[in-house]
Image (cartoon, rainbow, N blue to C red):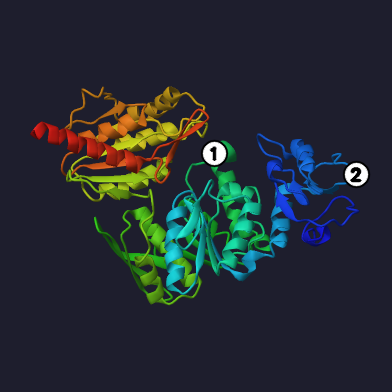
Amino acid sequence: MKLSQILSDVKVLNDVVGDVDITSLAYDSRQVQPGGLFFALSGEVVDGHDYIGDAVARGAVAVVVQRPIDVGQDVEMVQVADSRYAMARIAASFYDYPGREMLIVGVTGTNGKTTMTYLMESLLQQAGYTPAVVGTISNRLGDEGEEANRTTPESLDLLRMLADFRQRGADALVIEVSSHALMQSRVVGLTFDVAIFTNLTPEHLDYHKNMESYFAAKTRLFCEPETYGHLKAVVNTDDPYGAKLVRQLNDVISVGHHRGASLRVEDCQQTLDGTVAHIRCEYGDLTLRSPLIGRFNLENLLCAAGAGVALGLPVATIELGLAAAKRVPGRLERIDNCLGALIVVDYAHTSDALAKALDAVTVLKPQRIITVFGCGGDRDALKRPAMGEVAARASMLTIVTSDNPRTEDPQKILADICVGIERVCPQRWSVDQVRPDEKGYVVLEDRHDAIAFAVAQLGEGDLLLIAGKGHEDYQIVGSEKKHFDDCEQVRLALACQRSDDNDTDQ
């Protein structure tokens, strides 16, 4: 494709003399191929302008830059105001606008995005679509996919992926849209039909600095029709920021418990088997049935039903589609056991998400709640004491352990968490001091040991929540990424316990 063709949607700040053939695109100089176009992206740590020489040496015939730079006589320099924005527009053109032929549903918010994609995937399948899904756990079409390495891919990777999905028969896309993605133009080049706002709670404040900036990033999806299309908005107005967003929009479907919502909860029952909720809707009342539990999952179900209404789907299609949705890996995922206890693994890694997970299991009225969790290193430290307080308030036994400490001192992370725990639970125990009838907490840095210890404490009717990593099958310690799966660790602990019991019987 000629350079002039793929620059047709981009404002270029300099005169581009040559009109070379472009055979590939790359933003990593190591991925550049002969005849390729290289994007010099300016990041917080790495500046792509420093790698232009490497890109040219590997065969780049053109480079996109944000500042003038000597690229040599045989290479075309394309100067733009924002390389990331330009990359999205150029990639859309290069891959022949793959999103134009798809119905696109975007999901944004702090919590619930991944669950929402599973619900929407099932709903669209019930409606006769062949949806692709891009999100935190995987990027997939049907049963075929690959593990995701970030919530929303870079625009170039995303549009390349969509072109492949389109070729394989996808006619719809459900995509998690992170705040980082909106700030970094990763979903520019897509025209959304529906956008869903789940909630907003403190997270990524190391990046956004404060909640208002975080909220402003999220609202870009809804408030920039010239970029993202004249979409239909579905907003959870039980969330304060959702209620705030609704006041900024004209055409919106609101969902929640309050009387003014377009879809509102009339009645709801939750058991170990899941949720049954009767929904009053001005477009036709619905009964939602799902194996999901917890008020936050009811909000997710409402948002998905609202999206179905926004798309004009029949009530029966919405009900059947949501009832058929698969369980989401690492989202209150249950682990079978012979102890008479309920064991669940959840991705909750903010104070709000942890509170919601604990609320969800508390309504099941267990004998005792044991919670195992930690906090990631090199990330927002302010949430650590908040998560500690939330866990200790709801749990009889709180076990603090490592999550992904990364390059931070694990003991410093644990100490930060304990500050919050001690606001409501000053009793710290060693592993030999734990009393099942008293409230307290234990610190075990090794996550394997923490999970094994928690399983060993379980009795009939107890509930164990292991939070923070959910579907992740790794742990990052220092710069090393090693295999670690909470579900596997629970099953290993259960197997060891059965073996110990058998040895005792003999």
Q: Residues within 10 Å of mark 2 (few under 14, many from 20)?
A: few
**Residue 103 in view, yes or no:** yes
Report the residue marked by disc 2: 73
Left or right position of 266 against 408: left
Circle nearer the N terminus (1, 2): 2
Quarter of the image for the N terminus: give it.
Answer: bottom right
- Where in the figure is residue 309, as x and y percent of width and height? 46, 72
The structure residue drawn at horizontal position 54% and vertical position 67%, both measured from the top left corner, is 172
Camera-near label (1 vs 2) is 2
Q: Quadrant of residue 288?
A: bottom left
Q: Which of 12 and 31 is in front in this view?
A: 31
Measuring from the top left, give residue 256's x and y in whole percent. Answer: 41, 61
**Percent from the top left, x then y, of residue 394?**
29, 39
Dot 2 amino acid type: Gln
Pick the front one: 315 or 372 = 372
- Location of residue 450 in the rendering, given as x and y in whole percent from the top left corner: 31, 31
User: As displayed, is residue 175 above or below residue 474?
Assistant: below
Residue at 79% over, 44% down: 66
| Res. 255 in view | no
In the rendered image, which quarter contains the C terminus?
A: top left
- Residue at 60% across / 67% down in the picture? 167
Query: For mark 1, does the 10 Å Cα neighbourhood hold few (<14), some (14 to 19), or many (20 or more) residues?
Result: some
Splitting the image into 4 quarters, where does residue 297 fall? bottom left
Judging by the rendered image, the residue that carries numbered circle 1 is: 205
Compute the Cα span from label 1 to label 2: 44 Å
Identify the amino acid type marked 1. Leu
Which type of secondary structure does the marked residue at label 1 adopt? Answer: helix
